[in-house]
Amino acid sequence: MKTRTSVALAVIAGFGLGAVSIHGLHAQAKPPVFVVVEIDVANMDAYMKEYAPQAQALVKKFGARQLAASANVTALSGKAPSRVAVQQWESLEKVKAWFGSKEYKENRAIGDKYAKFRIFTVEGTPQP
């Protein structure tokens, strides 16, 4: 009887552990969201002093990783913007929280004095 109880408990524990592991794998498979910002800067000095540092700090504050932010842009087709930024976010909800925040809107008002922006998101593919 003792052996049957031990085996039954082991099976139940194994099932629970398997369920938790599967849930963890599904959570890891959630694809990231990338924000791509094309920026045509009219006044690079003012843009870099008054807008860019705060913009990058806000991206970090809201939980994204800045993957690229550079004026070193090479066009393969069409006209390249003067600057590009690429950010990686955990979810579209976090992107929307950042984009709709008071801090972003205030900083963007400064950026709009020096540049024109084209911002869009793209869903990434799940990584193993």
Image (cartoon, helix red, strand yellow):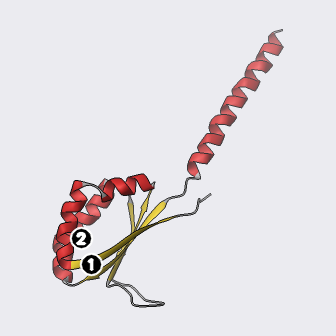
Please state the horizontal and vertical placement of residue 3, each as a whole percent of the image.
Answer: 82, 14
Q: Label 1 amino acid?
A: Lys
What number is the disc on residue 116? 1
Vertical relation: 31 (above or below) 71: above
Q: If you read the primary sequence from the N terminus, does the residue marked by circle 2 or circle 1 appear first?
A: 2
Vertical relation: 49 (above or below) 124: below
What number is the disc on residue 10? none
Left or right, residue 16 beside residue 6: left
Question: On the image, which quarter does residue 81 sit in?
Answer: bottom left
Left or right, residue 103 beside residue 95: left
Residue at screen point 31% across, 85% down: 82
Residue at screen point 45% across, 54% down: 91
Q: Quick one: SS at disc 1?
A: strand
Label 2 crowd bin: few (<14), some (14–19), many (20+), radius 10 Å: some
Q: Nearest the camera: 81 or 13?
A: 81
Q: How many marks?
A: 2
Q: CA distance from mark 2 to mark 1?
A: 13 Å
Query: Which residue matches tag 2?
Result: 52
Please state the horizontal and vertical placement of residue 41, each as a whole percent of the image.
Answer: 25, 82
Q: Nearer the viewer, mark 2 or mark 1?
A: 1
Label 1 crowd bin: few (<14), some (14–19), many (20+), radius 10 Å: some
Q: Quadrant of the C terminus?
A: bottom right
Vertical relation: 64 (above or below) 17: below
Q: Nearest the camera: 55 or 72?
A: 55
Please state the horizontal and vertical placement of residue 37, each as a whole percent of the image.
Answer: 36, 73
Q: Is residue 63 visible?
A: no
